[in-house]
Image (cartoon, helix red, strand yellow):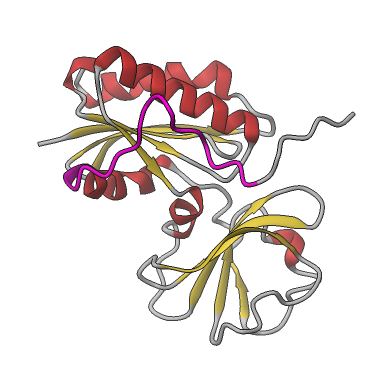
Amino acid sequence: MAYILNIETATKNCSVCVAKDGVVVSLKEYAGEGYAHAEKLHVFIDEALREAGIDYKSLDAVAVSMGPGSYTGLRIGVSAAKGLCYALSLPLIAIDTLELLARRLKIDEGRIIPMIDARRMEAYTAVFDAGYHKLKETKAQIITEDPFNEIEGTLHLVGDGAEKCRPVLNSARFVYHEDIVYPSSSEMAIVSYDKHKKSDTVDVAYFEPFYLKDFLISK
């Protein structure tokens, strides 16, 4: 039996869940207009553990969404995860944020393209098949023409970066799922459990989020 705390803060959704053997037993999340991660994350962790009926010492691992995504959001989530791992001597598990977003959609055929807004006409994106195997590596994609013309079949677009693609990616093969906007820690449960069983962990001291792009300060 394994209890894993899952933390997802790569987007505007501040999301925490506790999972037992890959099954979500408690979930706390909030996706507001701004980023409320600094105020809500540790409160959500406490509440999720309480609702799961366990304490911090009952945890077997901590999993965190590794990016790409918001620079500040990722820093907050990873810092919290590292702090818990240090204090409780727990292993740290890192999970691809785009895979988590893709896992929010269930399809029988076609491809899933998760898109996280990267400002202007860019989106952090990758391509996954129906079994969530990555077919095209993560990149900051400039949406100016069809960048997926070599991929055949129906393409399902999800995430907060998808909507701005409509004027450019408007052929019949693109299907937009407006109800799937942000990744959630609930999709982390089965992934983190599988990684835990394989001891697929990262070094707590040296792990850093996958920012993909450098942090830029603008007015």
Residue 181 at x, y percent in the picture = 58, 51
Quadrant in which residue 10 is drawn? top right
Predominant secondary structure, magenta span: loop
Q: Residue furthest top?
A: 87
Q: Is residue 107 left or right of residue 48?
A: right
Residue 3 at x, y percent in the picture = 20, 32
Say which residue appears at 62% left-offset and 47% top-offset: 212
Q: Which contiguous range is marked in magenta?
A: 196-212
Residue 103 vs 151, above or below: the answer is: above
Say which residue appears at 25% left-offset and 33% top-offset: 4
Residue 96 at x, y percent in the picture = 45, 49
Q: Is residue 80 left or right of residue 194?
A: right
Residue 102 vs 31, above or below: the answer is: below
Q: Is residue 11 left or right of residue 16?
A: right
Residue 24 vs 163, above or below: the answer is: above
Q: Residue furthest right?
A: 219
The answer to whether residue 46 is visible is: no
On whether residue 186 falls in the magenta region, the answer is no
Residue 92 vs 47, above or below: the answer is: below
The answer to whether residue 133 is visible is: yes
Q: Nearer the viewer, residue 17 or 127?
A: 127
Residue 11 at x, y percent in the picture = 59, 40
Q: Residue furthest front?
A: 206
